[in-house]
Image: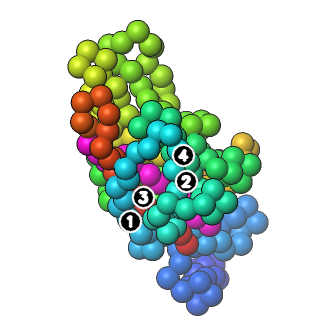
Amino acid sequence: MNKLFTTAALACALTLGLTSCDKDKNGEEIATLLDSKATIQSKTMIPDEESTIFFNIDTNNEAEETASQISLSGTMNLDLKLTEPTKYRLGYFDSEIKNIEGIKVAVLDTASINYTDKLTMNMISGPMPSIPNGWYNYLFTNHTVAPIEGRYVILFEGNEDTDFSNTLDKVYIIQLTAITQNGGTADDFSIKTKIFTK
């Protein structure tokens, strides 16, 4: 049995190189997401509430709508939605890890992911009730905004029946890291993205 297991593990290593291996329900070796292949990028954007920002996470740049995964619109361009909701699934999770660099596959495996159609503003101490799917806070008493610490956006290819799995081909993580405010408006905002692949 040990010899058989060793042979299977060796076959996986030879076939998939440095790719991590798991087994499906039939005992077949399958590749899983790797921390060692994850890439991190930063981007600062200038909001323009009269237009929608379409963003391609792979290229880390604004793009045409058809070449993007997400759109940023609304107040300070901070309403995040999918540009192709039938192709991707969007969600968010909270972690005690405050920086995206610390988010690993093991963290995603145990994260409590809440699926949603958009990420938006959460008002604090104001006339509107708090909402669960905020990714930044608006403090009504002094009209300041700030990212929600430890909150991460997650998206991957799939439909409403697709849940996170470390056997997905690619997973995107987004963190809103800063909002530069000037009075009642924002001069710019910054995000970091982390892309996990096999």
Instruction: Measure how far apart labels 2 and 1 are at the Cα level.
Output: 19 Å
Give the number of the mark in front: 2 or 1: 2
Neighbourhood count class around disc 4 (C-alpha, 10 Å): few under 14, some 14–19, many 20 upward: some
Q: Which mark is residue 52?
A: 4
Question: Whole-Å distance between the Cαs marked 1 and 3?
Answer: 6 Å
Q: Earlier in the sequence, mark 2 or mark 3?
A: 2
State the SS at label 4.
loop
**Nearer the viewer's eye, disc 3 or disc 4?**
4
Q: Amino acid at mark 3?
A: Thr
N-term mark: 1 or 3: 1
Place residue 47 in its image quadrant: top left
Find out whether the residues at labels 1 and 3 contact each other: C-beta distance under 8 Å. Answer: yes
Residue matched to label 3? 193
Residue at the spot of label 2: 54
Q: Which amino acid type is shown beneath numbered disc 2?
A: Phe
Discs 4, 2 touching: Cβ within 8 Å: yes
